[in-house]
């Protein structure tokens, strides 16, 4: 079971209700098991953090970064957070919000390639996965 901070549950729920445009756009492409039949969750509470998107079977976290992430302080916080996630065994992909709008296919291809390398369950609802 993943570590999580109960205090963040309400905040995560609020973030799901108020996604950024970039998060909403990516969500339309990865929700409902559209990529290799893999389930993604949005605004998932892991430890003392809330990640934008989480795919448990591939141990993948996807972060969509706005401008605040590119300041010296933002970069430092992201590094600490990414190191924590790596210690839990996750791979973290970071995309800028601009990249999501200008190159969604490139972002999806990178995610898909990671899913290709991940050990996926042999069966999915309705039959054998291909």
Image (tube, grey):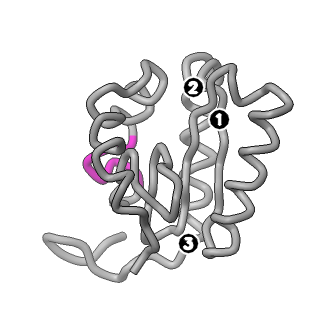
Residue visible at 51% across and 78% down in the picture: 119
In the image, 50 versus 58, the foreground residue is: 50
* CB atoms of marks 1 and 2 within 8 Å: yes
Foreground mark, 3 or 2, reads 2
In the image, 67 versus 49, the foreground residue is: 49
Q: Main secondary structure of the magenta part?
A: loop
Q: Count the marks: how many?
A: 3
Task: Provide the residue span drawn in magenta.
Answer: 30-35
Q: Name the residue tied to disc 1.
A: 95
Q: Name the residue tied to disc 3.
A: 118
- Please say if 106 is above or below 52: above
Crowdedness near tag 2: few (<14), some (14–19) or many (≥20) residues, C-alpha within 10 Å: many
Q: How far apart are labels 3 and 1 at the CA level?
A: 20 Å
Quick one: quadrant of the N terminus? bottom left
Asked whether 113 falls inside the magenta stretch, the response is no
Q: Name the residue tied to disc 2.
A: 100
Query: Which element is circle 2 on?
Result: helix
Query: Which element is circle 3 on?
Result: loop
In the image, 110 versus 81, the foreground residue is: 81
Q: Position of residue 50 (x, y in %)?
A: 47, 49
Horizontal side of residue 70 vs 97, given as left or right: right
């Amino acid at each position: 079971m993943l570590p999580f901070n109960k205090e963040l549950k309400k905040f995560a729920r609020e973030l799901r209700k108020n996604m950024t445009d970039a998060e909403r756009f990516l969500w339309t492409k990865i929700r409902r098991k559209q990529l290799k039949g893999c389930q993604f969750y949005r605004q998932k509470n892991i430890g003392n953090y809330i990640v934008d998107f989480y795919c448990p079977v591939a141990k993948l976290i996807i972060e969509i970064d706005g401008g605040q992430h590119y300041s010296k302080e933002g970069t430092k916080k992201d590094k600490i957070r990414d190191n924590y996630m790596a210690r839990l065994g996750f791979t973290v992909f970071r995309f800028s919000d601009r990249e999501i709008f200008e190159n969604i296919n490139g972002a999806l291809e990178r995610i898909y390639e990671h899913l290709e390398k991940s050990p996926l369950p042999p069966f999915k609802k309705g039959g054998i996965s291909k």
